[in-house]
Structure formats: C-alpha cells, structure tokens
Amino acid sequence: MTFTLESRRLISPPSALTGVDHRQAPLLEALERERERSAAAFTTPGHKQGAGIDEALRGLLGREIFASDLWLGTAAHDRALRGAQELAADAWGADRSFFLGNGSSSGNHAFLLATLCPGDEVLVSRDLHTSLLTALILCGARPIYFTPRLHPTLGVGLGIAPEDVAAALDAHPSARLVALVSPTYWGVAADLAGVVEVAHARGVPVYVDEAWGAHFPFHPALPPSAMACGADGAVTSVHKLLAGLTPGAILNVQGLRVDAGRVNAAVRMTQTTSPFVPLFASIDACRRQMALNGTSLLHETIALAAEARARIARIPRLSLVDGERLGLPPCRYDATRLVIDVQGLGSTGIEVERVLRERFGVAPEMSDLVGIVCLISVGDTAESIDRLVNALAALERTPLRETDRFDNLLRSSAAAVATGPQAMSPREAHFAPAHAVPLATATGRVAVELVVPYPPGIPALVPGEVITAEKVSHLRMMAQAGMHICGPADPELATIRVVA
C-alpha cells in the first residue's frame, strides 16, 4: 500500500481516550523559543551556537545543529522535560516515562539499580544485552540465567517461554525480578503476556529490555508492547527504528510493584547533568510524530518490508528468516525486520556486508557467520528498498571470498546464549584479582571480563562464568571468522582474563 504526502502530514485531535493533546512538544517548543531570543548567550556550550566550531566539522554536520545546541537553564529545562515525559507516558501506555540521553543501556542500569540490592537474586534471560550485564555488576545482584529456546535448525532464539519462567521462579522463590530481552535483534518477540502472568502470580515484577520495539505501540500488526502486556518496566530506543536522534531512549514504568520515585532517582544517577537538549527535543518530536501519525507511517513501513521480502525471496541462493519460517504467530514477530541468510552464496554474512557497503553503498544493520539483518523503518522509501534489493540481486554476479560452510548453530544468537556454570556473581568476578591466560588453556577457569561478539551485543562469556570447552571453541570460531569482539583486554582473543 502507498501513502500520499498529505497522509504523512495528518494532524490528529487530542486523544479521545485520555484527553491528552499530542500536538504539543514541550521540549521542542522551549528550545525553539530559546533559540529565537539567545542572540548573545554567555552560557555553555562554549562553541556559542556554532561560532567556534571547526570548519570541517561544521561542513559535515551543518550549521543548524550547532545553532540549536543551547542550554535552557536548569529550571526551564526540567519543566519542559516533565511535560514531554508526561506526553511520552501517555503515548507508550506507561504511568511514568523518563527520557534517556545515553541510550537504552542507561535505562537498564537505572532500573536494576532502582529495584535490586546487592545479593538479590534476579532471573535474567541469557540473551541479555551487554548493558544488562553491566547493570548486574553495578547493583551487585546475583543472576539466575535462563536460556531462550532456539529454533532447532536455524539457531534463532524463539524467546523466553512462560513455563520456563514459572519453573525458574519455583526453583528460586526469593528472586526479586524477572528481566528479559524482547524483541531480539532478529525480530522475535517473547510471549510477554504469558511471562508477566506467571511472574505476577508469584508477586515478582517483570522488566523488559525493549530497545528494538519502540514502534510496537503504534500499529496493530506489530507485536504488543511490554507496557500493553503488563510489564512493570521497559526501556525502548526511539533512535533505532523511529525518528529520534542517536542515542535517545525512554524508560517506561507502570503499576505498584516498582517504586517510580526510586526509578527517577536512579535515572538521575545514571545520566549526565549536562544533557544534549536537541537529543531530548528529538525524543519529544518523535513522540508527537508517532502519536499523531504513527499508524499510517508504520502501515507504509510494513508494506515496504513485505514488498522487499517478496522480492528477496525470488533471488537465488538467498533465504529469508521470518515469523512463518520460525513457526511463530504474527503477534510474535516484527514485520519490519529483514533477516537474510546468505550461506547459499558460499560465504559469510560478514563478507556479504563488506561487499554491500564497499561496492553498492548499502549498509546492513549487522552481520554474522550466517547472514545479515536489515531494518525497514519510517525513514524508508520505495527508492531505498529498490537499492537494497538490486544490490542483493547483484551478489549473484559479484565475486565473494569463499569460506567454510559454518554449521547453522554457529549463528551468533545460538552458542553465545548457552548458560555456563556460575562460580561467582558478575560483581564479585569483576572486582576479583585477575590475570591473563591463553584462551586455549582457559577451560575450567572463571572469567573476569565480558566477551561480546558485536553485533548483536550478546555476551558469549560473562564475568563469574566458568569457561567451558564449548565456549572456547565458539569464541575461537567467531574470532577466526572475522567477527568484531568487544570487551576483552585482548581484542584478538589470544588471551583472556580469569580469576587469579
């Protein structure tokens, strides 16, 4: 389906359900007023609306962004921020929303700091993002990892099952929180309503790292959002698939199981006291855009993704992974995600991404040993879809570096999420005396550092985990295949730091 420009510019009336007028944008409007009246600002930032900026940088980024980089003053900023956050809470279906200037990562830090104490047990899905692991180190909680179910041949995580959460809570009745990731990098949404039901029946709150699901509340064809499923807290990144500036994000909370005042204090602890106001204004403007026009924008986005999927399916030696192939109902898969396996080309996704970027100017979101992931968002057009599909079709005629045909289970979402024996909490291991040993001899030792093939940012090895032979084999394969490894002191992974 196509849409006219007029449908994109539709201005809706105030919400019929809440009476909230989403035509407002308190932060954006405050910044516009400040820009008009600050002809001579003797405040930070020191570049003074771009006057002192390096010419090359001004040429790259343009003048307007620097002219809008203004400080409103603490009182005016806080008033406008509160108004913008109240509107965001209405749009995302939360009781309270908090704007984040350091991405969903800082939301993960803030929520766990607000809800957990040192030594508390917390159930955590093993496909957690690095920032959730960092939050465990910061707050000192003891994770009980549970593993998402994997597709038996594709190696894609199918999300955390409610019955697995119920079993884990029954085995660990003192657990204070259930924390999981949904949706995944590959577009799979967990059965959040089921997870929330079994956790709440035992009096345990649920927190969702929903960084990749900011668009879910605004179209019925997408999976239900964490807030709609009754989660007590969720963080979401408006910059990933909506039209906010990087790294804008929102932390949403609802209900009585979480103290919103403690969350507010933790958010302040984990944010800079010198926020980039245009970033927050972009979150405000993004909320207005989606509250007023989100359904029509996403309707077009979903249609573009469907068109791309149909055309890619006709390209020889490429295959698509989607909800139907994974055996998931439509409400469990993000229809805007394109997961494209390239093993039929005799190469890796890493090599295909390199060729797409260097020869065709097409940039996938990520790649691994098996394929690539491309994101279709509200910023895409028929022209951008054509460019992507034409580049993929041209791979048939493009020389690629041949590689070994890796086992499907070496997809970076598979072996990386296997739970190993835990000898220490992440915090205890982080602060333990440590030294480096050759990776080849590390089996049986206790890891001190994170080892994260990136993207997608799932730690293959976490502090406090006993290093198994299977993990060593997986990490060596990832490094040999050219995946970028974050976290360890030795980025080549010849050595790894372990508890002394």
Image: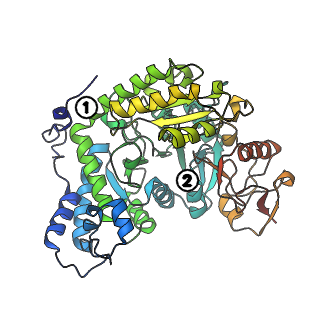
- Comparing 233 with 105, the one in front is 105
SS of the residue under disc 1: helix
**Pointer 2: residues within 10 angstroms few (<14), some, or many (20+)?**
many
Figure colour scheme: rainbow
**Residue indicated by mark 2:** 132
Residue 408 falls in which quadrant of the image? top right
Of the residues tagged 1 and 2, which is closer to the observer? 1
**Residue indicated by mark 1:** 296
Q: Which residue is drawn at 66% across and 46% down?
A: 483
Q: In which quarter of the image is the N terminus?
A: top left
**Pointer 1: residues within 10 angstroms few (<14), some, or many (20+)?**
many
SS of the residue under disc 2: helix
Residue 361 relative to residue 153: left or right:
left
Q: Is residue 17 visible?
A: yes
Residue pushed farthest bottom?
42
Residue 493 relative to residue 317: left or right:
right
Residue 444 relative to residue 45: left or right:
right
- Comparing 456 with 147, the one in front is 456
- Comparing 216 with 68, the one in front is 68
Q: Which amino acid does label 2 sit on?
A: Leu
Relative image position of residue 78 (x, y in whole percent): 26, 67
Instruction: Give the mark nearer the N terminus: 1 vs 2.
Output: 2
Q: Which residue is drawn at 54% across and 24% down?
A: 320
Relative image position of residue 42 (x, y in whole percent): 24, 82
- Comparing 231 with 326, the one in front is 326
Counting every numbered tag in the picture gives 2
**Separation of residues labelled 1 and 2 (CA atoms):** 34 Å
Q: Is residue 333 visible?
A: no
Q: For residue 493, which numbered disc appears in the image?
A: none
Q: Which amino acid does label 1 sit on?
A: Ser
Relative image position of residue 254 (x, y in whole percent): 36, 48
Asked whether the residues under the numbered discs 1 and 2 touch, taking CB atoms below 8 Å apart as contact, a structural biologist would say no
